[in-house]
Amino acid sequence: MTEDPALTAEGLGKKYGGRGRGWALRECDFALPAGRICALVGPNGAGKSTLLALAAGLLRPTEGAIGAPAREHLAYVAQDKPLHPRLSVADTLRMGRELNPGRWDSALAERIVEGGGFSSDTLVHHLSGGQRTRVALALALGKRPGLLLLDEPMADLDPLARHQLMGVLMADAAEHGTTVVMSSHILTELEGACDHLLLLHGGRVRLDGAVDELLAAHTLLTGPVADLAPHTVVESRTTGRQLTALIRHEGPVEGPWETSEPSLEDLLLAHLRTTEGAPA
Ligand SMILES: Nc1ncnc2c1ncn2[C@@H]1O[C@H](COP(=O)(O)OP(=O)(O)OP(=O)(O)O)[C@@H](O)[C@H]1O
């Protein structure tokens, strides 16, 4: 039996209002299987935040449809981590408990906040950016969502905090089968953490799939310059007579090249570089 996908998009498009505004997302189709940790990547302005806000139900599609769980079963941490500035940390968590009766995991929320080096009677207003992130993550995870939407969650955390919170997040998601969609520009942070990839560029889905399948479908090769047909060349560079290329292979790669499987970072960088100048 296959489980229903946790998040789907069908012909999804979003156009912001106002003169001169274009499409932030266009003709997006995907079905994210439940239980995946999905990296949402793409250059600035690719549409990642728009997609997460649509999934959270904070924006409405201009065309097409997005399928996501009901609001009580999802949690969303926006890029600017909005919290009530005049509440203390303890009051913020109390509010989380009151808003999520019967579901709130106070032990988990408190564990996330405790690592932050601030007391629970501190006002949110007096927290640093990284400390606010911790409280926002505690509120989101404490809700025990089926789908967790995180918009650049780790951007303002120090390396130790990032490591610790990614560990808590991954362990908790694995234990409860939570689906996580996490946008990030920090490619090394995604490697090892994410098992699904959604690459956006110019508002369109450029790559979508399980990380291991995507990696296995690509080959890094170096060797003499030669025709790479029938393979699809994602990116290639030549230095003198030496060719370095990332290809999406069609069948076995036969030729005088040294080949290896790319890392997730190799794959993402190659796709990001080739879509850079491409029409949106
Ligand atoms: N409120 C808005 N009004 C008008 N245009 C918007 C609005 N929010 C985003 N856009 C436009 O929509 C496009 C997608 O923006 P979005 O914030 O979704 O990208 P992003 O991939 O999250 O970028 P970043 O990596 O910089 O956070 C951009 O061209 C942006 O200018």
Image (cartoon, rainbow, N blue to C red):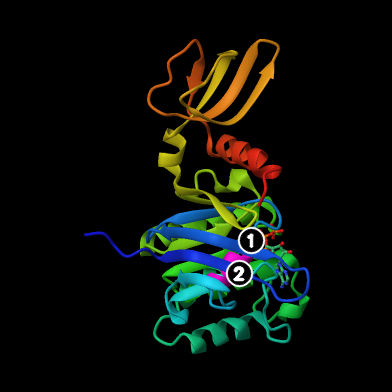
Specify the segment rendered in magenta.
49-55
The residue that appears at 42% across and 56% down in the rendered structure is 36
The amino acid at mark 1 is: Gly
Q: Secondary structure at mark 1?
A: loop
Point out the quarter of the image occupied by ligand 1. Answer: bottom right
Q: Nearer the viewer, residue 231 or 220?
A: 231
What crowding class fits label 2: few (fewer than 14 Cα within 10 Å), some (14-19), or many (20 or more)?
many
Assess whether mark 2 and mark 1 are in contact (beta carbons under 8 angstroms). yes
The disc, 1 or 2, on the residue closer to the chain's N-terminal end is 2
Query: Where is residue 52, by image quadrant?
Result: bottom right
Taking the image as shown, residue 180 lies to the left or right of residue 183, namely left
Circle 1 residue: 47
**Residue 223: percent from left, percent from top:** 57, 13
Ligand 1 within 8 Å, label 1 CB: yes
> How far is the residue under mark 1 from the one under mark 2?
9 Å
Ligand 1 within 8 Å, label 2 CB: yes
Q: Secondary structure at mark 2?
A: strand
Circle 2 residue: 14
Whether residue 238 appears in magenta in the rendering, the answer is: no
Q: Above or below — where is 263 with respect to 240?
A: below
Q: Nearer the viewer, residue 63 or 167?
A: 63
